[in-house]
């Protein structure tokens, strides 16, 4: 059983806050827990929730895509390995189609 400290979780929060700041100038797509691995933000042992279904099929999601854009809550897309590429393309089109200007 893994244990992790409040400091590790704070590092995750800080990394997310940094990405939120970066997204003020351009959209940032972040892949959390790639392929079911651990936290991408820092070295804490937080892992992907295993009860979240993929947005494209009935399999459990292994990666959580988070899209950060200025002034908005992050959009979250849980996807399985086989839908990760599709999801990235769809999100890129979505971002381009909804970009101001
Ligand atoms: Zn972490
Ligand atoms: Zn899927």
Image (cartoon, helix red, strand yellow):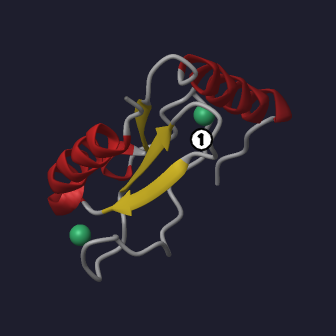
Q: Residue at x 16, y 55 (%)?
A: 86
Picture coordinates of residue 11, whole percent (x, y): 71, 25
Which residue is outermost to the front? 101
Question: Looking at the picture, does residue 20 appear above or below residue 85?
Answer: above
Q: Which residue is mark 1?
A: 45
Question: Looking at the picture, does residue 33 appear above or below residue 61?
Answer: above
Picture coordinates of residue 97, whole percent (x, y): 28, 44
State which quarter of the image contains the C terminus. Answer: top left
Q: Is residue 55 left or right of residue 4?
A: left
Picture coordinates of residue 66, whole percent (x, y): 47, 45
Q: Does mark 1's beta carbon lie closer than 8 Å to ligand 1?
A: yes
Picture quadrant of residue 18: top right
Q: Is residue 82 left or right of residue 56?
A: left
Picture quadrant of residue 16: top right
Element at label 1:
loop
Which residue is outermost to the bottom? 58
Picture coordinates of residue 37, whole percent (x, y): 39, 45
Q: Is residue 97 left or right of residue 36?
A: left
Q: Residue at x 49, y 55 (%)?
A: 76
Q: Residue at x 57, y 45 (%)?
A: 74
Q: Nearer the viewer, residue 85 or 12?
A: 85
Q: Nearer the viewer, residue 93 or 30?
A: 93
């Amino acid at each position: 059983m893994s244990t992790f400290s409040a400091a590790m979780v704070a590092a995750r929060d800080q990394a997310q806050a940094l990405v939120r700041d970066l997204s003020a100038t351009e959209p940032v797509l972040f892949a959390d827990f790639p392929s079911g691995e651990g936290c991408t933000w820092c070295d804490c042992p937080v892992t992907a929730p295993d009860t979240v279904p993929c947005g494209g099929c009935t399999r459990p999601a292994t990666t959580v895509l988070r899209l950060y854009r200025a002034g908005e809550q992050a959009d979250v897309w849980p996807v399985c390995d086989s839908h990760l590429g599709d999801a990235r393309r769809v999100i890129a089109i979505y971002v381009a189609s909804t970009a101001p200007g």
